[in-house]
Image (tube, grey):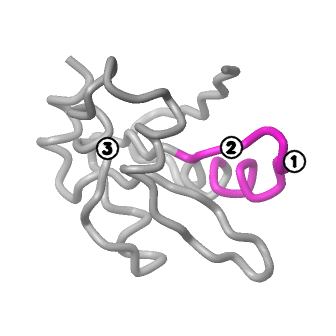
Amino acid sequence: MPLLAVTYVKGRPGVTTTALGLVATAPAQARAVMVECDPAGGDLMRRHQVAAAPSVVDLAAAPRGAAGPADVFAAATQVVTLREATVPVVVAPAGGAQTRRCRS
C-alpha cells in the first residue's frame, strides 16, 4: 500500500488543505484516505463539521491481527464532501494530546 505524507513546519498554513486536495483528486482505484496526524489537531472537525469520533486514536487502537487494513481504516474513517468529491478522512482530536500519544 503506497503512502504519501504531506508535512510542513509547525504553524504553517495549507498542509491540511493540500493533503485534502490530493486525496480528492486521487483516482478511485488508489483508495486514498487522508489521515490527519497534526499534533495540534482538529482542523478537519472545525472546517468541515466532522465529528470528533471516530478519530486517529481509534485507528491507532484498532486490532491489527483481527481485520485487514481496509477494515481497520473503514472503522475509523468519516467523509468530507468537497463540491462533487467525497473524501474519506480520519480526523485528529482537537488539542493534540491524544494524537501525540498515538505516534509513540
Magenta-highlighted residues: 19-34
Q: Residues within 10 Å of mark 2 (few under 14, many from 20)?
A: many
Q: Please report whichever mark, 2 or 1, sits nearer to the chain's N-terminal start.
A: 1
Q: Quadrant of residue 99?
A: top left
Residue 36 is left or right of residue 5, and the answer is left
* 101 to 31, vertically: above or below: above
Mark 2–mark 1 distance (CA, rounded to whole Å): 8 Å
Identity of the residue drawn at 14% across and 42% down: 98
Residue type indicated by callout 1: Pro
Does residue 102 appear left or right of residue 27 in this picture? left
Identified at 32% across, 25% down, the residue is 66
Q: Earlier in the sequence, mark 3 or mark 1?
A: 1
Q: Is residue 52 magenta?
A: no
Tell me which amino acid carries mark 3: Val
- Above or below — where is 91 with respect to 72? below
Q: Which mark is residue 27?
A: 1
At numbered mark 2, what does the secondary structure look like: helix, strand or loop?
loop
Circle 3 crowding by C-alpha within 10 Å: few under 14, some 14–19, many from 20: many
Front residue (pair 40, 28):
28
**Which residue bears the numbered disc 2?**
32
Identify which residue is drawn at 15% across, 29% down: 101
Q: Amino acid at mark 2?
A: Ala
Quarter of the C terminus within the rendering: top left
| Disc 3 from disc 1: Cα separation | 23 Å
Q: CA separation, marks 3 and 2? A: 16 Å
Relative image position of residue 103 (x, y in whole percent):
26, 23
Callout 3 touching callout 1 (CB < 8 Å): no
Residue 1 location (% of width, % of height): 66, 20
Compared to residue 59, the image places residue 26 above or below, namely below
| Quarter of the image where one finds residue 72 | top left
